[in-house]
Amino acid sequence: MHVRARGDSVKSFSDRVEIRGRSLWSRNAVKGVSLRGERLKRDGRKEWRQWNPRASKLGAALLKASQSGLLPEHGSTCLYLGSGHGTTISHLHDHVCGSKNHLNGTIVSVDISSRCMRDMIRLTKTRPGIIPVLADCRQVQEITPFLSRRVPWLFQDVSQSGQVEMFIEACNRFLEENGTGLLSLKSASERDTQSAFVHAETALLEAGFTLVEKIDLAGWEEQHVLFHVVK
């Protein structure tokens, strides 16, 4: 059983995601299972998985953000563009869906890599609520059939040129009014690396988004900034 040490500070984003000391944790929806070798801790009847910020842009942003509102509500329908092998998706599932999806959440996870999709499909066997979609994030019509309505939360982590324009198009098509959009921007993937972040901020404001916070992920992810916007 994990016993909290005296002076061990705790910051709760919800009853399912916490910062304890300097580490980020999510309440494990599949007890006893460590997806990528991450540490597990017991706290009474609860089990927590350590959320590695070096393997997750969202995890790094949660540790560095000064504003709240990065995470969706329990039971939300979420759209994740560029889901990769599912590390962040699994922690998001801990928060949005919970054990056997008792929170009734949905995470539509899109990636163009068939290898990543194989990993995502394996993940769905123990984590119901995740919908893996093999598609090009630039082709919004390929994603549309998997969403019956607009979503309150959209995250994009796609390392290719034109990330900002892709994000704006996706938000215009899929994000509901007052919804939260998170863009993880890698400057090295853009043609003009020096002004990539300035260009992104200008483009987002001109597209009508409210910029809540611009989070530099340096220390966890170099040359990455996460833009937290509201439509």
Image: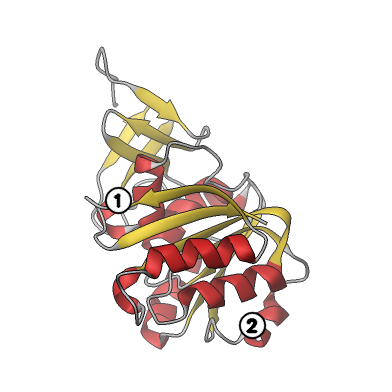
Q: Tell me: 169 left or right of 160.
A: right
Q: Residue at x 49, y 53 (%)?
A: 92
Viewport quadrant of the N terminus: top left
Horizontal arrangement in the rendering, residue 130 relative to residue 199 (left or right) = right
Instruction: Give above or below for 78 relative to 195.
Output: above
| Residue where numbered disc 2 is placed | 140
User: Between 207 and 37, which is closer to the camera in this rendering?
Assistant: 207
- Inter-mark Cα distance, 1 to 2: 29 Å
Look at 26% across and 14% down and name the residue there: 7
Q: Which quadrant of the figure contains the C terminus?
A: bottom right
Q: Residue at x 38, y 37 (%)?
A: 47
Crowd rating for badge 1 (residues with CA inside 10 Å; few <14, some 14–19, many 20+):
many
Would you name the residue on which mark 1 appears?
53
Q: Nearer the viewer, residue 74 or 219?
A: 219
> In this figure, what is the number of numbered marks?
2
Where residue 128 sits: x, y (%)?
Answer: 57, 61
Instruction: Choose top left, top right, bottom left or bottom right for residue 36.
Output: bottom left
